[in-house]
Amino acid sequence: MFAYLDHQASTPCDAAVLAAMAPWWSEHPANPASRGHRPGLAAAAAVERARGQVATVLGAGPEGVVFTSGATEANNLALKGVAEAALSGGSRRRRLVSLVSEHRAVLDPLRYLERHGFPLSLLPVQPDGRLELAALENALGDDVLLVSVMAANNEIGVLQPLAEVAALCRRVGALLHVDAAQAAGHIPLAIEALGIDLLSVSGHKCGGPPGVGALLVRQGVELAPQLHGGGQEHGRRAGSVPVPLVVGLGEALQLAEADRASRALRLGGLRDRLWTALERLGGVQRNGPAPGPLRLAHNLNITVLAVDGAALHQRLRRRLAVSSGSACSQGSPSHVLAALGRSRAEAAASIRFGLGRATTSAEIDLAIDVVTDAVRELRG
Ligand SMILES: *Cc1c(COP(=O)(O)O)cnc(C)c1O
């Protein structure tokens, strides 16, 4: 038996999502921009239906949904698009504010902008990964163009206080971007009610296909396109819209929202059982907040003290798909765990468990057995 417990790196595409996408690969060919014939109009209608699904789940208007190739592209469009619009629109605001624990798909575009004249303030986080509101308040002034704060962290599952962050941003007239790749379909997110200006989502983090995502943009936010071409998506993102993929994204988000609460309850129970069993080993510490309202229900991240990280993961690999950090950090030690004060060795001996809709109780039993055996063996 093998257990896939790396749903925060990628979720399997749901069967109902595959079924919804199926006809759009070959049965109904057509470019949704071809408005001159019936197949084109049918494709356009499918895209607009998906746009409505995405907007409804996220509490926004459909006109604000820009389909992209994923959350990485959505983040790049949001951050560079706002910066470029500020340059050409004559705004004097330049400063960008974010957190040290953001995903690299936010940090790297921000560092790119820093090299091009946009000063960057990266705020530290508290030991549980939460942003300190007082630190954010201190960093905010009328020179701040944009604040980027993720909804849920991909490694430690910590949720950030978005409503409070949005209120602080509004007070100084700064825009708020939220990377919600790990949150959309997993926690309630009502963009307009929360006061979020831009929000990124990803298909393959919520039971949808990879290679598709969306940026939600509040009306009135100036955004310079980063892909130029055929003027699709109201000129905000050129490129033929991939009909099957956006249909899959819409369906996945709608499905995720439909069982969101019951799924969180069930996975939270499995996650808590996993933690209780692993804590009994001794010398095991949890990274991120305690289970509860400040954490994703399907995430657990632990550091195993007094074992070698490489040897630990080598043993886990045979029976479990888990990770030692983010799937995107490519071998370097986790900057998120470092931000919590973990040493390189501790970060290497850390395990992220990401549970998902398909996770069973038997898989949690397996994970408990495999980690317990590996830790006992390595500790002699
Ligand atoms: C996965 C992830 C991304 C990147 O999403 P893609 O759709 O794979 O480009 C960005 N931010 C966070 C928080 C993620 O977890």
Image (tube, helix red, strand yellow):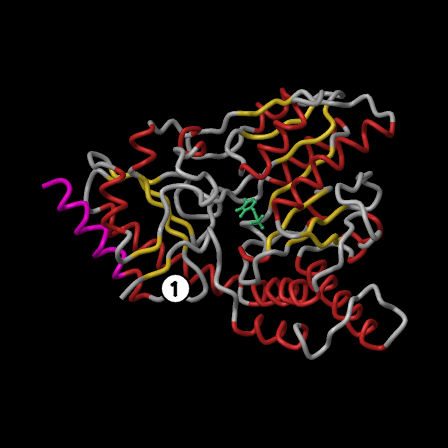
Q: Is residue 158 above or below residue 25?
A: above
Whether 214 is drawn above or below 220: the answer is below
Q: Position of residue 203 (x, y in %)?
A: 59, 57
Residue 199: x %, y % from top left = 67, 46
Q: Nearer the viewer, residue 178 or 327?
A: 327
Q: Is residue 187 magenta?
A: no
Q: Quadrant of residue 312?
A: top left
The one nearer the camera, 258 or 363, is: 363
Amino acid found under the numbered disc labelled 1: Thr
> Helix or strand or loop: what does disc 1 sit on?
loop
Residue 138 image point, x, y percent: 63, 20
Q: Residue at x 57, y 62 (%)?
A: 209
The question of residue 372 being in magenta is answered with: yes
Q: Quadrant of the N terminus?
A: bottom left
- Residue at the location (44% across, 53% down)? 297
* Segment colored magenta: 365-380
Indicate if the residue with disc 1 has its beta carbon within 8 Å of ligand 1: no
The residue positioned 48% from the left and 47% from the top of the image is 293
Which of the 4 image quarters holds residue 156?
top left
Can residue 269 be seen in this snapshot? yes
- Quickly name the residue at label 1: 359
Q: Quadrant of residue 7?
A: bottom left
Q: Is residue 195 visible?
A: no
Relative to 21, residue 261 above or below? above
In this picture, is 136 found above or below 305? above
Residue sitting at the far left: 380
